[in-house]
Amino acid sequence: MAVYLIANVDVTDAAAYDRYRAQVPATVAQYGGRFLVRGGSVEALEGAYDPKRVVVLEFPSEERAHAWWNSPEYAPLMALRRSASRGNLYFVAGV
């Protein structure tokens, strides 16, 4: 079953975040993941939620998603992302 990483990111350092964005796709692909949404425009329909930069990744399984998240390839990029932004990230199981 597919697993999705859903993130709402508020970028605080655009230059550093651009370095993150340039490097992360290769790590995602290495673990079988792919970007479905990567910071496109957002149209709020209901509620008070105010998303900033929305990202959705798809992985083929929970195992592959967690392997990427905990990988040595992603670890330095996670640190870079955290230094350049703040946000909420979730793994959500597909149906």
Image: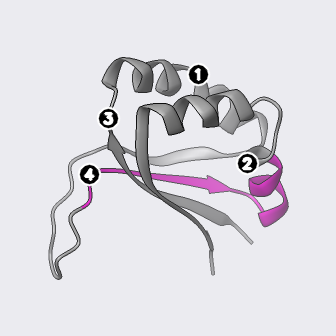
- Nearer the viewer's eye, disc 1 or disc 3? 3
Q: Nearer the viewer, mark 1 or mark 4?
A: 4
Residue type, mark 2 in image? Trp
Picture coordinates of residue 58, whole percent (x, y): 61, 55
Q: Residues under labels 1 and 4: Cα distance?
A: 21 Å
Element on which disc 1 rests:
helix
Q: Residues within 10 Å of mark 4 (few under 14, many from 20)?
A: some
Q: Earlier in the sequence, mark 1 or mark 3?
A: 3
The label number, if any, that marks residue 23 in the structure image? 1
Indicate which disc, 3 or 4, sits on the residue closer to the N terminus.
3
Residue 82 in the figure: left or right of residue 53: right
Residue at 17 percent of width and 77 percent of height:
48
Alpha-carbon span between mark 3 and mark 4: 11 Å
Q: Mark 4 sits on what residue?
A: 52
Q: Quadrant of residue 5?
A: bottom right
Which quadrant of the figure contains the N terminus?
bottom right
The answer to whether 95 appears left or right of 54 in the picture is: right
Residue 80 drawn at (x, y percent): 56, 28
Q: Which mark is residue 69?
A: 2
Instruction: Determine whether the residue tagged by mark 3 lies in a helix, strand or loop.
Output: loop
Kind of residue indicated by mark 3: Thr
Chain-order first, disc 3 or disc 2: 3
Q: CA distance from mark 1 to mark 3?
A: 18 Å
- Contact (Cβ within 8 Å) of mark 1 with mark 3: no
* Residue with the mark numbered 3: 12
Pick the residue in front: 42 or 20.
20
Classed neighbour count for the residue bearing mark 2: other residues with Cα under 10 Å, few (<14), some (14–19), many (≥20): some
The residue closer to the viewer here, 92 or 29, is 92
- Callout in the foreground (3, 2): 3
Q: Is residue 31 visible?
A: yes
Is residue 23 within the magenta segment? no
